[in-house]
Amino acid sequence: MTLLYVLDIVGTLVFSISGAFRAVKYELDLLGVLVLSVATGVGGGCVRDLILGSTPPAAFQDETYLLVCLAGGLLVFLAAGRIARRWDCVMFADAIGLGVFAAIGAAKASACGLGTVGVIMMAGVTATGGGVIRDILVVEIPAILRTDFYATAAICGGACFVGAEYAGLPLGAQLACCVLITCGLRFLAMRFGISLPKIKSLPSSPSNLTQMHRDRKD
């Protein structure tokens, strides 16, 4: 059992816990908690494997991932209050999981012969796909599109994986670069509240603004 596999399992557990807490927000029943837990924990990896043509997805070849997700969901269902009080620890582990998932996604994409853009995209999809599925299931705009420096950290990590690959570094070093950069950026964002610039809303729709501009000319 490799260290990367152990970290992958830990990351899956933490992601499943974060998914289960979204179910707590909407006061879903036990099934709802478990569905969001599994979707968040393995969703990104399943999407990655389907895109790469690796079927059945890894989560179904090694059912440890699914069992870990179910365990995370049950843990939240039974002890949500206690876990919430240690949310800082959960977020720390979540950042590590983000880095590991990004590295695994990049490595699998590279092994399948994808180019630079494809490898970076698979790093981002693997790391954040579960969260996107979770948010869609509860009818929310995916968090990675509106808040936090999350997907960006995974994308930067994927880019570093590609850079290390071009530099001729061994696979272990490529994975380490991706994990360290992704986790480091995520930790900095958590510590200093870093986020990408947001677009400001317009005072009216583009068609109305165009019509107003024409009226002024007339």
Image: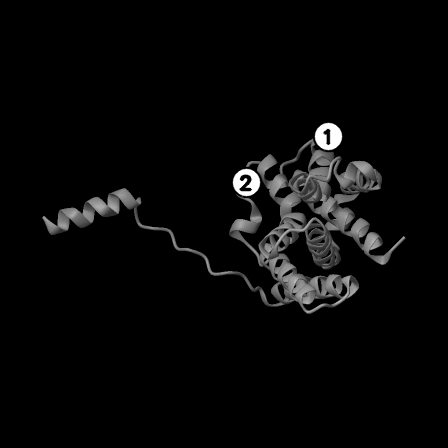
Mark 2 vs mark 1, CA separation in Å: 19 Å
Residue at figure coordinates x 67%, y 33% from the top left? 28
Residue 20 in view in this figure: no
Quadrant for residue 179, please give it.
Answer: bottom right
At horizontal 16% and vertical 47% (from top left) the residue drawn is 214
Question: Judging from the image, what secondary structure is the residue with disc 1 in?
Answer: helix
Q: Quadrant of residue 177?
A: bottom right
Which sits in the foreground, 81 or 35? 35
In the image: residue 68, left or right of residue 47: right
Choose the circle earlier in sequence order: 2 or 1.
Answer: 1
Q: Which residue is painted at 72% across and 42% down in the image?
A: 42
Note whether 57 is above or below 114 in the view shown.
Answer: above
**Residue 123, position as x, y percentages in the image:** 65, 53
Residue 51: where, in percent of width, then height?
A: 64, 41
| 216 or 81: nearer the viewer | 216
- Name the residue tied to disc 2: 140
- The three-letter amino acid code for the residue at tag 2 is Glu
* Residue at image mark 1: 31
User: Picture coordinates of residue 154 (x, y %)?
Assistant: 64, 57
> How many numbered discs?
2
| Residue kind at label 1, given as amino acid type | Leu
